[in-house]
Image (cartoon, rainbow, N blue to C red):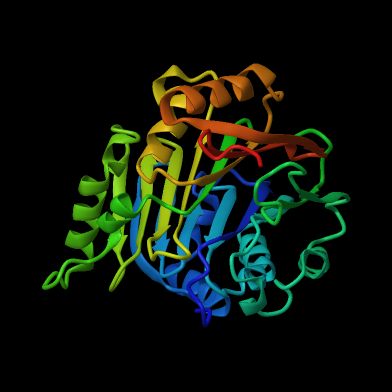
Amino acid sequence: MAVSGFEGFEKRLELRFSTTNNNPMGLRLIDFESLDQVLNEVQCTVVSAVANRSFDAYVLSESSLFVYPTKIIIKTCGTTQLLKSIRPFIHLARNLNLTLRACRYSRGSFIFPKAQPFPYTSFEDEVVIVEESLPNSLRYRKASVMTPSNNNNPSRAWHVFTASADVEPDEPLVVVEVCMTELDRVNARSFFRRKGDDNSNSAGKEMTRLSGIDTINANAFICDFAFDPCGYSMNGVDGDRYSTIHVTPEDGFSYASFECGLSLYDDGHGDISEVLTRAIDVFRPDCVSVATTYGGEDYNHEVTKRVERTLAKKLGLKCRSRLVDEFPGSGTVVFQSFTPRRREEK
């Protein structure tokens, strides 16, 4: 917790593994006690969980953890020590005969950077810590700070570090990460606990319904949680696809994030621009950034333009900048920044 407010911007880590055995459960065989020990090092805990045939989803006291047979995704907010999870996760995977083949660390620009502990005060220091935690077999490495040059808020940038054992990406999914600040005050009220409601699960379900989050993907099973006195987290489970939302609604440093994994060509999971529109419309923010990572699928410029047209037409958001960068073994990242059309450049 920062003196001036809670840090909503998450740090995100994705570890992908390969296996030499035929055990379909893979990383899901890690026992809860071991996971809890790793999370304790990170300085967070599990508050709710759900699982299906494809993966396990945990809502954390600070954001989320997803465990697939050969992939771990963990994102944490506040002043958590996310990078302390790298070595323990690699060790736990090794005990199951899984070998790390790719790593990706990403985050936005913190609202309260001076409140962060070392090494999160500097992206360069974070990269050093990540690299020291990885095996030499991940030899294709790249760090990049994607900074919009003509954004109304030039301090907003996207930080990415990737390391891979292979040049070509092995992940076919497209990962979309949305960061939203300056949330609409009326919409943000949905994420404050009501007096007398002391049940975090029932309060979470009420927030999901009142805010319209349940309409983003009607096919998903939602595991939600309401914090006291305010704040909200959810994980969505839809087959082998995940989604997650985290909200810090306080005025002055309001923040919300939406993330999902999807395929550009899977009609059963909706068009990427429509999914983003429904998610962003829940919060009606004044500042939006969208980082899209195209894994095994080639970067599609037309998809990016469609996203921009749809957000402009349906939400009145103008794309202020678009940056594209390629990462060996980890695909292409497209970073877009949006603000309302009424906020014209001065």
Q: Is residue 166 left or right of residue 316?
A: right
Q: Position of residue 28 (x, y in %)?
A: 48, 55
Q: Position of residue 311 (x, y in %)?
A: 49, 28
- The residue lying furthest to the bottom in this view is 3
In the rendered image, which quarter is residue 336 located in? top right
Residue 297, above or below 203: above
- The residue lying furthest to the front in this view is 346
Q: Is residue 336 left or right of residue 310?
A: right
Q: Position of residue 261 (x, y in %)?
A: 52, 37
Residue nearest the viewer, comparing 26 with 300:
300
For image coordinates 69% across by 20% down, the residue present is 301
For image coordinates 67% across by 66% down, the residue present is 86
Q: Which image quadrant: the C terminus? A: top right
Q: From this viewpoint, is residue 170 visible?
A: no
For image coordinates 59% across by 65% down, the residue present is 111
Residue 91, above or below 338: below
Q: Position of residue 98 (x, y in %)?
A: 66, 54
Q: From this viewpoint, is residue 132 visible?
A: yes
Residue nearest the viewer, comparing 156 with 142:
156
Residue nearest the viewer, comparing 163 with 114:
114
In the rendered image, which quarter is residue 175 located in? top right
Residue nearest the viewer, comparing 215 with 99:
215
Q: How many marks?
A: 0
Residue 234, above or below 313: below
